[in-house]
Structures are given as C-alpha cells and as structure tokens.
Image (cartoon, rainbow, N blue to C red):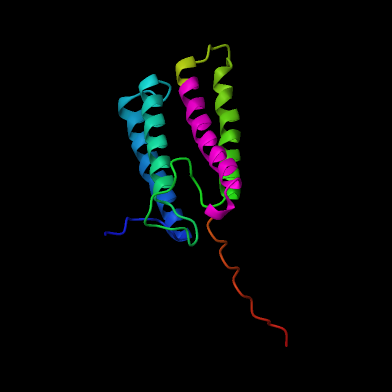
C-alpha cells in the first residue's frame, strides 16, 4: 500500500502557509488589477472558493506530532490537538468581526451586501470548522496527537 502524502513537520506547515499566501496574494493582485474589481461579487466568490479549498486541503494533509498518517482523519477533525483549533478558530472569529464591518455604511456609501456576506461567510465557516474540531476532540483525548518534546537546554553555569 502506498503511503499518502502528509505534512507533519512544523517547517513544512509553515512553508505550505507561506507559499500559499504568496501564490494566492499574487493571483488576487493580478485579478483585481486587470480583470475584476476587488469589490465585485465574482471576486468575492472566487476568493471564498480558493481560501476554503486551500484550508480544507491543509486540514486533510496536515498531521500532528506522532498522529497516524496512513488512515484519513475523521471528517470533522481539523487539528491534531484541541488547543490548536481553539487558537485558529479564535483568530477567524476575530477576522469575522473585522469582515462584519463591511456590512456597515462607510463615508455615506451603502455597503455591498453580497460581497460582505460572502466575506463574512468565509471566516464563519473556517472558524466553525476549527472550533467544532476542538470541541469534539476534547471529548476524545485518545485521538489527540502527542505533545512535541521540549528541547533540552544545557546548563551553561560555570
């Protein structure tokens, strides 16, 4: 049986996030510069689809420390341990509050409700996924990935 490709190391996860950010930031820069308005519905829907897709790909292939890599994760599981999901979920809730400000009129202009709803939906869906995963993982500690060992420090005293 062929072993599926998994991202298990912190440096690999960081590289996945940095490369994804750079590639998609460049793609969206090109789109909003030459093809679509940044405040248009097609741009918002494309942003939603790409961000959700990239996030779901990441949660499917990332694995925690010593988490089994061959069998797939449960559909609801987005992190190796609950704490990671709570942090990531909280960050997306915070971003949701920022996106919700698009629902308010600014400078006497009416908000673009379609774009605001799509942007809020993105953060709400991702926040829900991470928080749901963490609450469910809290009920099943046997599924948690192991903690990484703390690096040993040498005693430098004379």
Residue 89 lies left or right of residue 58; in this view the side is right
Taking 91 as reference, is 153 above or below it? below
Q: Can residue 112 be seen in this snapshot? A: no
Residue at 55% of width from left, 54% of height from top?
A: 142
Residue at the right extreme of this rendering: 158
Q: Where is residue 84 in the image (x, y as percent from the top left)?
A: 57, 49
Residue at 34% of width from left, 37% of height from top?
A: 27
Taking 118 as reference, is 56 above or below it? below
Which stretch is magenta? 116-143
Q: Position of residue 154 (x, y in %)?
A: 64, 80
Query: Is 136 part of what is drawn in magenta?
Result: yes
Q: Nearer the viewer, residue 102 or 67?
A: 67
Residue at the left extreme of this rendering: 1
The image quadrant of residue 11 is bottom left
Taking 85 as reference, is 126 above or below it? above
Residue 58 lies left or right of residue 96; in this view the side is left
Residue at 40% of width from left, 56% of height from top?
A: 7
Q: Where is residue 147 in the image (x, y as percent from the top left)?
A: 57, 61
Q: Position of residue 151 (x, y in %)?
A: 59, 71
Q: In which quarter of the image is the C terminus?
A: bottom right
**Magenta span dominant secondary structure:** helix
Q: Can residue 108 be seen in this snapshot? A: yes
Q: Which of 42 and 74 is in front in this view?
A: 74
Taking 109 as reference, is 154 above or below it? below
Question: Across the whole image, how many numbered discs are drawn on residues?
Answer: 0
Query: Is 113 part of what is drawn in magenta?
Result: no
Q: Quadrant of the N terminus?
A: bottom left
């Amino acid at each position: 049986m062929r072993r599926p490709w998994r991202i298990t190391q912190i440096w690999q996860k960081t590289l996945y996030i940095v490369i994804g950010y750079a590639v998609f930031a460049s793609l969206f820069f090109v789109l909003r510069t030459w093809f679509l308005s940044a405040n248009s519905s097609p741009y918002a829907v494309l942003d939603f689809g790409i961000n959700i897709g990239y996030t779901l790909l990441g949660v499917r292939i990332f694995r925690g420390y010593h988490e089994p890599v061959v069998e797939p994760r449960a559909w609801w599981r987005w992190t190796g341990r609950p704490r990671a999901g709570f942090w990531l979920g909280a960050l997306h809730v915070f971003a949701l509050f920022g996106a919700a400000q698009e629902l308010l009129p600014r400078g006497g202009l009416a908000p673009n409700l379609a774009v605001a709803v799509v942007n809020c939906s993105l953060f709400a869906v991702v926040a829900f996924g991470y928080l749901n995963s963490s609450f469910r993982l809290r009920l099943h500690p046997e599924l948690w990935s192991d903690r990484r060992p703390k690096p040993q420090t040498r005693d430098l005293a004379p």
